[in-house]
Image (cartoon, grey):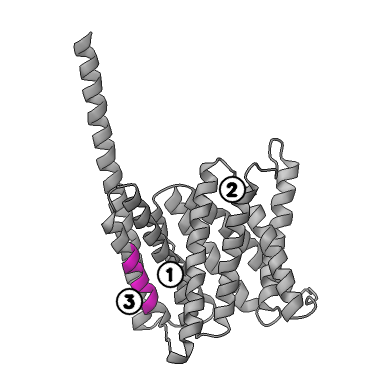
Amino acid sequence: MGSLWMLAASFFFALMAAFTKIGADAFGTFELVFYRQIFAVFVLGAIAFATPGQTLKTRYPWGHFKRSILGTMALLVWFWALGRLPLGTAMTLDYTSPLFMAAIVIVLALRHREPIEWKLVGCVLLGFVGISLVLHPDVRSSDFTAGLIGLSAGFFAALAQFQIRQIVALKEPTYRIVFYFSLIGTIAGLGGHLAFEGPLTPITTDNVVPLLGVAICGMLAQLSLTRAWGGGNLLLTSSLQYSAIVFAAVIGLLFFDEPIDFLSGTGIAVIIFAGFAASLETKRKQRKDADIARKLQAYVDQSTDTDK
């Protein structure tokens, strides 16, 4: 289910990017972040208050604060990089988060003396190769410092995603995790807009549709992303995160007349293959673990019968 939730999150993120592209002429960057996040604050807050048994009170405020700050930093650094780097380069740097997640998994496995799932690590690396083919990053010498700063967006995103997993393990519900992230993002988006872009843009019938699209798809994407990182194999989930680029390419072709050239098509094929291979490897490992568990249980049952 974690894999399916990541595919859903990737689809909604791609849709959100499409609405952002439409609304970028009317709204500033920080302003879009603000409206995207405040919508989730109101909707999730209203659902929590109206649903019996649900509450926004938490016993883990520090965990929510860390997740929200890391996620907001990743978002703001990425937007900063978008203004200073070629689009393909900035997008590629943002999608280094699965690589950082793979590094975190390897370090934790070495620390706990557990086996490293090298095949899944390879799938994550292969997916990043596909991303690079699709986005055509171009890092010039003058962009080196900005590139290093932009690279930190992927690092912060990986830390935020790992923090999500830790909060979910504490039995915190998805809506509460997304609510506090959205609350911090609302404050950062509004503060950044007022500081750098001036007063808020009036909402009219001409610009409300893309704004609602960004807000609704952003909230659904965060809910799906939180569910995805809360369970399942971390490396498989990281590999499937690249599927957002595939969805975005298809949406660009269908709605924005953006052609897919040979190099991009090859990259999309590589991303799909990497995700498929990661899924097969995860299923194989699950079957192997299940067989071992059954054999152990059979041995225990046999020993118990013998003792009787």
Q: On the rendered image, what quadrant is the C terminus found in?
A: top left
- Crowding near pointer 2: few (<14 within 10 Å), some, many (20+)? some
Rendered residue at 32%/57% (across/down): 278
Alpha carbon distance from label 3 to label 2: 36 Å
Label 1 CA crowd tier, 10 Å (few <14, some 14–19, many 20+): many
Residue 101: image x %, image y %?
42, 60
Distance between the alpha carbons at the discs numbered 1 and 3: 19 Å
Tags 1 and 2 touching, CB below 8 Å: no
Q: What whole-number distance in Å separates the C-alpha atoms at marks 1 and 2?
A: 25 Å
Identify the mark nearer the N-term, 3 or 2: 2
Magenta residues (range)? 124-133
Q: Nearer the viewer, mark 1 or mark 2?
A: 1
Which residue is nearer to you in this view: 20 or 55? 55
Q: Which residue is mark 2?
A: 174
Kindly identify the amino acid type of the residue bearing the numbered disc 2: Thr
Residue 308 among magenta residues: no
Query: What residue do we see at 56% from left, 40% from top?
Result: 171
**Residue wearing tag 1:** 96
* Mark 1 residue type: Thr
Count of numbered marks? 3
